[in-house]
Amino acid sequence: MIAVIAKREFANLFLSPLAWVILAVVQIILSWIFLAQIDNFLLLRPQLMQLENQPGVTDIVIAPVFSLAAIILLMVMPLITMRSLAEEKKTGSIQLLLSAPISLTELVLGKFGGLLLFVLTLATMLMLMPLSLLLGTDLDLGKLAGIWLAMILLLGAFAAIGLYLSSLTENPTIAAVGSFGALLMLWIIQWGSDNPVIRYLSMLDHHRRMLEGVFDTSDLAYFLLVMLLFLVLAIRQLDRERLPR
């Protein structure tokens, strides 16, 4: 049942032009940034060749592009998640889902699964740009795979938070604004603070380390815990709204 709901959610995303427009706009913006980074790399190459441990294309071109991609997608993902449950409430179809012979866990995981399919599609499309460089240069494929995984984990956390915020209201616009505010807070929460607990809550710090090729179990656990926490919160929120049987 989870797979069925996930496929339905993924298909519904593309029934409106929003998902198509988002994919196109994000791809165009990041392609421009990607080409600009290549130009910068070519300008810096003579100086880089004089360094003993010179950074490669993966460090100079690809990592910065995906770092900027994270900021852009922080603004975009709330537009994707805002309708997940809020639209169901607005149209009244949520009552049918809550009274259907499926568990709330299956419903939320199915919705989240559909969003993850979109995340995988988006991350894979973005990865085609750096992979095109294999035609003319060598890449650190291990670090490249790490960057791709870091993007999926980050967007998965974005999706879980957006899904929960969408469960709180029947207005998609409010859900989008609330999601953006929550994501932005988690992104900048460490600014001006040396408190280790606050810094651990920062998505920016965890994502930055993964882009640098530093894989720590604490970073992986952070993103998985964020996804788990907000999915559980979404299930509990729907449980309060389930129709009496």
Image: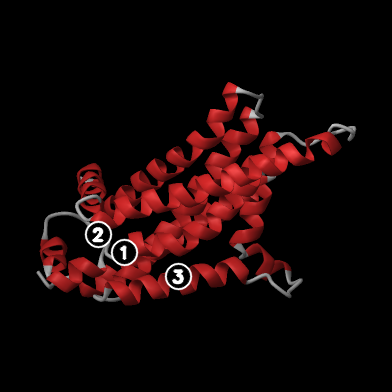
Q: What amino acid is labelled 3 in the image?
A: Phe
Q: Are marks 3 and 2 in contact (CB under 8 Å)?
A: no
Q: Decide: is 203 above or below 195.
A: above
Location of the N terminus (image quadrant):
top left
Q: Which mark is first along the chain, 1 or 2? A: 2
Q: Decide: is 188 above or below 37.
A: below
In the image, taking residue 105 as reference, residue 76 lies left or right, namely: right
- In depth, the one of 34 and 74 nearer the eye is 34
Q: Quadrant of residue 55?
A: top right
Q: Is residue 108 visible?
A: no
Q: Decide: is 90 above or below 227.
A: below
Residue 180 is marked as 3
Q: Residue 180 in the image: state x and y as whole percent.
A: 45, 70
* Structural crowding at the residue carrying mark 3, measured as other residues with C-alpha within 10 Å and reported as few (<14), some (14–19) or many (≥20): many
Q: What element carries label 2?
A: helix
Q: Which mark is first along the chain, 1 or 3? A: 3
Foreground mark, 3 or 2? 3
Q: Residue 36 in the image: state x and y as whole percent.
A: 62, 46
Q: How far apart are marks 2 and 1 (CA)?
A: 6 Å
Q: Do the residues labelled 2 and 1 touch (CB within 8 Å)?
A: yes
- Residue of label 2: 104
In the image, taking residue 35 as reference, residue 27 lies left or right, namely: left
Q: What amino acid is labelled 2 in the image?
A: Leu
Q: What amino acid is labelled 1 in the image?
A: Ile
- Residue of label 1: 235
Which residue is at 48% across, 46% downward? 152
Q: What element carries label 1?
A: helix
Location of the C terminus (image quadrant):
bottom left
Which residue is at 60% across, 47% downward? 65
Q: Which mark is first along the chain, 2 or 3? A: 2
